[in-house]
Each structure stands twice: as structure tokens, then as C-alpha cells.
Amino acid sequence: GLVNGSFTPSVSMLQHFIRRMLGSPVIVTHTLRSYEELACASMTVDSQSTNVRRQAILTSLCKLCLPSWGKRRPNCQLKESNIDSLWTMLWIIHSNYEKIFSDEWEIILSTLDQLAIISISSPKLQASYSKKAAAIAGCFIRLPTFTTCFTHGTLSQFIHSLVKLSEAVSFEPLTEQSSDITRVNSESTDGDPNADNIHADKEPSIGGKLMSWTGGFAGRFGGGPAQSSSTNNNTSFGRSASTGAFQFSKTYSEDLRETTCLQMGSMKISTPRAIIQKIPLPLLLVAIVAEANSYRLSVIEETVAKHLCEIVARSSSEELRSFAMEILIHLMPLSLSKSEVSLKYGSGPLMIEDKNESPLEVIPINDASKQKVSGQSQKVDSPQGEPQLLKILCQTIQRTTVADTANATLNALNVVLEGAGHSLSGENLITVIKTLSVLSGHTSDNDVPVNRSTKQWANVSTLAFQNLKLILDDFLEPMSTSSDSPLKSTEARDAILDCCVAFGRSRHDVNTSLTATGMLWSLADRDSSPGTVDIVLTKLAFLAMDSRPELRNCSVNTLFSCVVGLGDQFTDDQWEKSLNGTIFHLMNAIKEAENKKVDANGGASDERYKVAVHHSRNSASKRWATTQILILRGLYRVLRLFFARLMETLLGEEPWFLQTWKEILRVSFDCAKMAGERETLDMRLAGVELMALCAQLSCKSGIAAAGTTARVGTNMEVVGGALRSVRAAVEDKVPKTAETSVQNRPEMVGWRLQLFDFSFDMLCQFRVHLEENGEEENEGPRMTTDSLLTQVLTKMTGQLAKLYECCKNDEMTPGPCELQLDIFIENNDGYESRFLRLLLAIADNAGNDKNSRYLNQVQRGVMSLLQGMASNSSLIAFEALAKISGDYMFVRPKALSSKSNNDYDDNHGEIFELEAAKMVASAFDSDDLSNEAKVVVMCSVLLQYLKIYGNSENHRNDEAKRKTSEARYDIITSVIDSGLQATEHIDSNTNDKAILDSIWDRIIATVSSLLSPPVDNRYAGYAHHSKSILNIVAIVLSHLPPRKFSLAEPMLQNGADRAVEVAFECNEKNQYDEDIPYSQAAEGAVHVFLSCFMGLCQKIPTCPAVGQLTNQILGETIESDDLLSNNASPQSKTRQSLAIAVCESLRTTTSQDLLVGVFPLLCRLTNVENDGLRRAAGKILGGMNLSEAISRERQRAEQADTRAREIEEENIAMLEEIEYLQAENDELQRQLAIFSEEFT
């Protein structure tokens, strides 16, 4: 109590001595020494909690340091007492800095701040005091270095006090402060005794408030008058910091600012010199002191960072914001550095006892041996803690509500990342990533109540995304393979993924969103652990539900690219989760969104980006449909590449893939049959592709049998405008041996068959859908080119062609073909039959337009497939082609057309039925078609021909018989030629001739019908088809076996007789009849006769028909009288043509007997007046070997005479034997009569 009671009067007395006894230097000196001793005593006795006496002493002393303490008086003059008080205060600081707490530091620093703007020179000072004043100005320069001797606690309190002073002035514009100071300078009066009352209406400064508080404290302790509160309360607190205003002479802080300018240059701080001259001294000291103590920045880092970030965020001065930003950037690498920076100065305070020396001196460690150095206390190393500078900077960025501030701080963060981004790890990385996520512009319920989705935040979002790319591409990429990679941390990984999603959902820039989506895949590629990949797929599925179609589609494509790229590393659980949990969930969600007609428009970017949209995507439903299409195509990619791997999951305890397979088929079928307009076409096509792919994959041979082109990646991507390597390319490869053995296991074969059954059943369901709804869909509104159904069926036929290539040797292989007279197919439910029914259903719904000159793509596809099946010896395909072709195989299109236009000809264009008929003939050229199949199909075709043009027993009852003039023989000729070759081959290699004889009989019956047309319709056939008949007869005779020549004789004879008859009848008709060209028919009859007679001469030269026809025609020709007349009758010309035909036929025979028999007629023919006949006969005679013929005939005659003599001798012997036997018989009869009489 005694101490407290005497303390206040003592301080008041000392203050009174200084103020009132300035003329006595001795009193002033002793008074200041008392101040110093009293301060040292109070600092030794008082603790931080009871520091009232120390504050009072320092406050009283500081008030004596300035003429007007607590008020800004840049024009005031310091007196000698002020200089002595300042000198005493500085030595108290020098000697007791570790015992000064933050409240005392605020008083001291406020005094220095007020002193900084005062001129050093003063007319009231003697030369010695002017030198001392200059030394005091030097203390400003030494103060930052002096703080390196502080303990951590003292330094922290010192910085806290500086920041408190800086907060009062760092949020005002520099221009306003400068103008105020200038005004003060201009209004000041040098030596005015009332100067203390100038600007008394200003707000009290910190120093003023402290002095007011000290006076009140002294009043409470008793003794001494209290300071006038009315005066001190009116002093300016807000103006307590200096601003480097205009001075008439050098100020106390000017050297410090000049030194700071040089130091800022070495720190790479670009703040201009003029700005540094204006920066408030407390803020400037904060920066300089932090730099001086950079080796232990963690001690003051949090306080400094908070203050600088507040300036960056809230200051109205752009210059101050820029300066604070640069200081932050400079200090950030030191904050992030994990290594201890070397100490710049001694390990303890270097005390100098000589008071004539300047205070606040610190001697470097290499000068520590000097005599003036008293002693040093060992300083402990600065602690290493979590860097606060980056954390506080990020918190400032997150809290700011001003876009410009966020942009500025992000620029600072960008500079920091470029310089020290490689040091980011752990909490620092998470802090930065979360900060960037907040600035993405995506709003959620958990965000701070700042709407960053508006336009003014667009640039901020872009800059934040650039920082994210910098982290991921430049710093995270090199560490992705190391053990300490941030991706190994769950928290860091989740923060990065969430940040990418936030930028993906941001609506500021769609390109940013698309790039962020690609980053998710890149992260999964770097860390392919199941946890990371599962989260990435979930995030991509989440982004795929965005209302913007560009982002949706990009997310879907990225999702499937991620699955395709990393699928070979997936476990069974990952596959189940990705397919059932992610992809199908996404499909259902998109379908619901499409049903709700969720509009894809909206968001901040709509007004900024106006893009022309194609009509196929100009509505929400169309854009949602596009997303569904991408999902289907993604499933196509996944199944195509990983079907074998997914099949292996069926060997587990729970064969979940079976249900997944059914779901895939259901989805594809629903899409394939979807009703709608143009926007549904692509989805239907994708559904068809996926549905057919399932069947191709699950068949026994697999999709490789289809011969599809392999897809190979380049394993390169563009990053920053340059190519870089990524994972190995994914391509269709032959499975490894182990995997192949797994696929061949019996249980796996069973699973594959089950999957194929499901797939094929779904294709059959599509056929049922076509049969029920296809006609209605074709009758609906059509597009300009083809109906939607036609395009869908075109795609289906193409996929079915691939499926057949996969299955033609296994599931759809034709059964064994046996020789038979027609195609008989049991109505079974095999794959081939069901496949054919699907093709026929497609053909029925192909939209066959009778007015079209060409087949559409569906019809072409069906024809090509049927031809492929037929070439593979599929009898049901031939049967289908035959049924489709109908009469077009044998009848000209003009005759079958309903048009009566004469311009309609056989070359009108492609006709579906006619193309089917052509496919039958072209299938015979395939090497894969068996001989048995060729024979059976030929018999079926011949039977169909006989029903049209055959005898009455073969005619159909449902329609009238066709005219021979309407017939066509090009197709049947090709069929007969190939079929007879196959028949001949089989006939020569088998002993069972029963079925073959029936086949040959049908062939002969067909040719007989061809050579013997009906009486009422025979002229047109000869007129138009004589050459075709000639070819068919030649083909049949060339392959006919010898055992069937006997059946061919009447056929050829009747054909020759009918041809001769028709030829002469045509000559008797009116040659100018427009309906039938009789002259052409007569010529045709001659050709037919030639084919028949030549066949007889070659195959059966000894038959009576040959001689009969030869004698008849040649004899009549020789006896004709008008062969040489120019006006010869048509009959004579016809007879001449027939005679020449006979001669040409005789030339081809190998029978000399025949030639010998007609030798007389030939000789007589050489004597006629017609050159043509003479030459024809001469050629035959010239080719005969008469000497050989005569010798042969003479030998034959001799042999006949010899044989006759032998027979005569045998006859005589037989007569003698008969006479002998007759005599014996008479004797026996006589004896019999004798015996009879004896018994009677």
C-alpha cells in the first residue's frame, strides 16, 4: 500500500520537474535518470497482470518526448528536454525490452509514430542536441534489426502492438491522409504557444487515450493532479500514424523510408518509391520487422498474415492493398519452407553499457568479441508449426464479399503457387483446394452466404480454376507416383475431387466446367486405387445430371472413358458398383429428368453465351435424349472391351452380371422400339447397336468372328499445348492363355449360352414388335428421305449381318443337307429359323415403294444377309428367297407389273422380288455352298418353273398359265448350270442312284416342257427365247449320264419335230402380224431344231429319229426347185436353214455309221445349185474317211458272210439232230403201244 500510495505522486512530481524546470539541465538530467530507475524497478517488480505502474511511467515519459503528445504536429519543434526524454525512453527499451508487454509497446510505438513526421532540425536545439536528434532518427533504422534479439513472446507482443496501430490508418485512402497532413503543415504556426489547441476537435489518438487513462489512474492512486480528460478526449486517435507527408526538412523517419525502399528492391517488392514514402509507419514497420525475423516467421506469422489479409480485403487504398499483397507473396515461401533459416544476427542481445553510444544497437555475431559487448543469452531455435500465412490468406479469400478483392488475393495466391507450389502438402494443400472450391461460383447449402454465381465473380472463378490447374498439372502430377503423394491422403483426395466437381457445376464458363470434368478422369488415372476410382465415377455421374447438356455429355463420355481406361484393374465389386450402382442409376435419373422435361437452360452463363442450336437439340427433351444416347454408346464400349472379364464374375458366389445383362437388354430394347419423332432416332439406333452387340459378344465365336475393325488409342493427350504420354492404349486383344482356358470351362460355356439365349430372345421380341407395330409406324408421318423405322431397320440389318458372321458356323450352322426333290424344312424353333423370321419381318416393314427405281438400304441389307445365308448352304434362306421372288425368277417384270404404260420395260429399276431371284442364282457361285444344297435348290426352282410353264398336271390352280413370251431364262439357266454340275459330281461318286434318277427325271421333264410349248402359245416362245432354249439343252446334254440317254431321245425327237412343225407353220402366217413376229419365230424354231438334232447326233446317233429327220429334211431340200431363186418362198428358205442345221449337226457326230448311212444324200446334196448347201455337205464329206469306212464295211460284210456260213452249218447239224430225235421218238411210241397192249 505504501508503494502504491507513493508511486503516483512520484511520477507526477517527476513530470512536473521536466515541464517546469527546463532551464536547469541538472534537474532535467536527474529527473530522467529517476524515470529510468523507476521504470527498471517497476519492470522488475511488476508482472504482466499488474503492469499499471509501468504503463504510467512509460506514458508519462512518452508524453515528455513530444511537445504535443497524442496530436499530429508535423511542424512542431523539439526542445532539448524532448530529446533527452526520447533518449531515456530508447535506453529503457534497449535495456528492458524483454520486460515490456504489448500495452507498453503500444505507448512506445505510438510515440515513435508521432515523432516520425517531425523535422529533425530545430532552431531550439544546440549543435550537440542536433547530433543527438540525428542519432535518435537512426534508431528508426535500427529498430527492425533490434527486434531479432527479442524472445518469441516479446516479438509477438511487439508485432501485436504494431498491428493495432496499423489498423487505425491502413484502411483509409493515402491521398486523404496526405492532404490532411499538408493542410496541417500549411496551417501550423512555428512557435505558437497555443499550438496544442489546434485541431483539438480531432478524434483522440491511441496515445491520447492512453494519456487520458494514465491521468485517471493517477487520480485513483491519489497525489498529483489528473490530466484534463476534456482536452485528451478531443485528441486525434485515428491520425496517430504517420503518412510520410510533405515536410520542410528531413524527418525522423525519412532515412528509414529511404532504407526501406532499398530493402524492398532486394525483396523483389515492386511498390514504387513514392508509395513507400506514403505508407503508414506502423504498416511499414510490420513488413520490415517480419522480414528481419523471417527465420522465425512462425512466431509472428498469424498476426502479420491476418493484418495483411485484412488490408488486402478491406482497405480502400489500392496502393496499400497492392503493398500488403506483395508482402504476403514475399513471406509465403518462408512460411511454407520446412527448413530452418540461418540466423542473421547474434544469438542474444548485445548490450552496450556506454550511454554515449546510440541505443538499439545490435552487433553482428562476427563482432561479438568486441569489448563493448557485455554478455549474451543463448537463444533457442524457433519452433516449427503449421504455416498460418497461407491458411489466413485462404480464409480472407473465402470471407471476402468483394469480387475485386478476391481477384487480387487470388493473384497473390497464384504467385505463391508458382513459386512455392511444390511445397504444398497436407493441411496446406487442403486449405488451398477448399478455398478454390469456394470461389468456383457453385452455390450450395453449406456455402457462406455470398452469391458468387453472378457475373462480377466470373473472372474470380476463372482465376481460381487456373490456380487449380497449376496445382494439379505442375505440382501434383510429379508427386502422383511417390509414396507421399497428396492423393494418398483421403482428406486431400476428397478435397481435390470436390473442388473439381464444384468447378464442374459452376455456371460461369462452360469450358471451365468441361475441363474440370476431364480433371476427374486425370486424377483417377494418377491414383487408380478402388477408393479413388469409385469416388471419381460417382462424381462424374453426379455431374452427368447437370442441366447443361454440354457438361452432361462431357461427364458421361468421361465416365465411360475412365471405366474403359481403368477397367482392367477393376475388381468384381468395382464392376458391380460401376455398372449397377453408377451407370444404371444414372440412366434412371436421366430418364426421370427427361420425363419431367427439365429444361437445360438457366444459370448465369445463359445471357453471356448465345449459341445457335441445331433443330435436333433445340428442346430439353432432345438434349436429354442425347445424353441417354451417350450412355448407351458408353455401355457399348465397356461391353465390347470387357465382356470376357465380366463373364468371369459369373463364377463367383453371386452371379450379379446375369441380372445386369438382362437389364442391359431391357434398356436397349426399350430404346430400340421407342416411339417418337426425329429426336428419338439416334437413341433407337444406339439401342439396336447395343442389343445386337450383346448377341454378338455372347455367341460361341465371339465378336472377333465378325471381323470388325480394332480400335486402338494413341496413349497421348494434350497438356498445356504439348503432347504427353498417358496409360497404355486400350485395344481389342486376344485374351491370354489363362483367360482363354477360363472361358472354355464347361460352366463358363453354359453361362455364355444362357446370355446368348437372353440376347437372341430380345431380338425375337423386336420381331414381335415389328409385326405388331411396324405397319402403323411406316404409315405415320415420313421424313424427307426415309421413315424413322426404315433408318432403324437399316441399322438393324447391318448389325444382324455381323451377328450372322459370328454365328454362321456354330449357333446358326445349317443342318446336314440330304438330296430331295424339294426344300422341306421342319418348322423348328432353332436359331437359324428364328433369325430368318426376324429378317422376313424386317423385309415386310422395309417400306417397299413400288414407284421407286431402286431398293432402299433395308431391302439391300436383307438381300445381302439372305444371300450370305444361302451361300452357307442354308436351305431355309433359299426357300425364303424363292418365296420372295415368286414368279419373278421365270417371268419378265413387265408381265408382272400392274402398269399398262408401254414405256415400262424390264430395265425399269430394281425390284425387290427380282433381286431375290437374282440372289438365288448368285448364291450358287459361292464356294461354301455344298453340292447337295445346289441340287435340292435346283429341284425346287425347277418345280416352281413347272408350276408355271409345265404340263397341265403341274399347273397351279390359283392363277392362269403364263405366256411363254413373258418368260425369262437367265436366272434358271444359271441355276441349272451350277445344279447340274453338282448333280453330275454326286452321281459319279455314289452308288445310290434312286434319288438321282428322280432328279434327272425332273430335269428331263423341265426340258421337255421347254421344248414342247403348248399349241396355243408356242410361237412367242420360239420368237423370243430360242437362244436360251438352245443353251439349256446344251447344258443338260453335257451333264446327262448315259443311262438317261434313253429318256432324252423322245425329248429331243419331240423337240425337233415340234420345231420343224412350227418353222413351217410360221411361214404360212401373216408376217405383218404385230402381236407375234412369225419370221423371228421361224428362225427361233430352226435354232431349237438345231439344238435337239445336234443332241441326238452327239448322244444317240444310232436312234431312228436321226435317220428319219435326216432323210426327211435333206430329201425335201434336194427335191426343191426354188433354192436359188431370189423370190424363193419362206418355206424354201426355212427348208434350206433346216438342211444346213442338219449338216452342222452331222459334222459334230462321232458315228461313222450314221455318216455312211446318209452318204448318198450328202452326195446328191453336193449337186444342188445352192452354194451354202453344197459347202455344208462338202464339209461333212471332206471330214469322212471313205477308205476306212469302205474297208470297215467290207470287213463287216465278210464277218457277216462268215457268220452266215456258220449259222447255215449249225442249221444243217440241227436238222440232222431233229431227224434223229424224231426217229427215236417214233421208236419209243411204238414200244409204248406194245406195252399198253400187253397190260390190257
Image: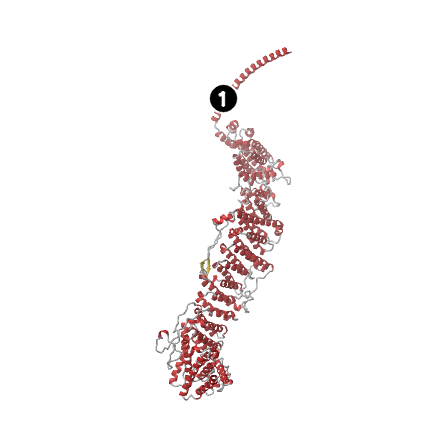
Give residue 747's position: percent from left, percent from top.
53, 47
Give residue 1183's position: percent from left, percent from top.
48, 30
Frontmost residue, 864 versus 485: 485
The image's colour scheme reads secondary structure
Give residue 146's position: percent from left, percent from top.
41, 76
How packed mark 1 is, by other alpha carbons closer than 10 Å (few <14, some 14-19, many 20 or more), is: few
Viewport quadrant of the C terminus: top right
Residue that mark 1 sits on: 1198
Residue 28 against residue 1232 in the figure, above or below: below
- Which residue is most to the front? 1
Frontmost residue, 610 versus 358: 358
- Residue 1016 in view in this figure: no
Q: Amino acid at mark 1?
A: Glu
Give residue 248's position: percent from left, percent from top.
42, 82
Residue 120 against residue 539 in the figure, above or below: below
Frontmost residue, 41 versus 941: 41
Q: Quadrant of residue 879?
A: top right
Q: Quadrant of residue 1235?
A: top right
Residue 790 against residue 998 in the figure, above or below: below
Q: Secondary structure at mark 1?
A: helix
Frontmost residue, 8 versus 984: 8
- Residue 667 in view in this figure: yes
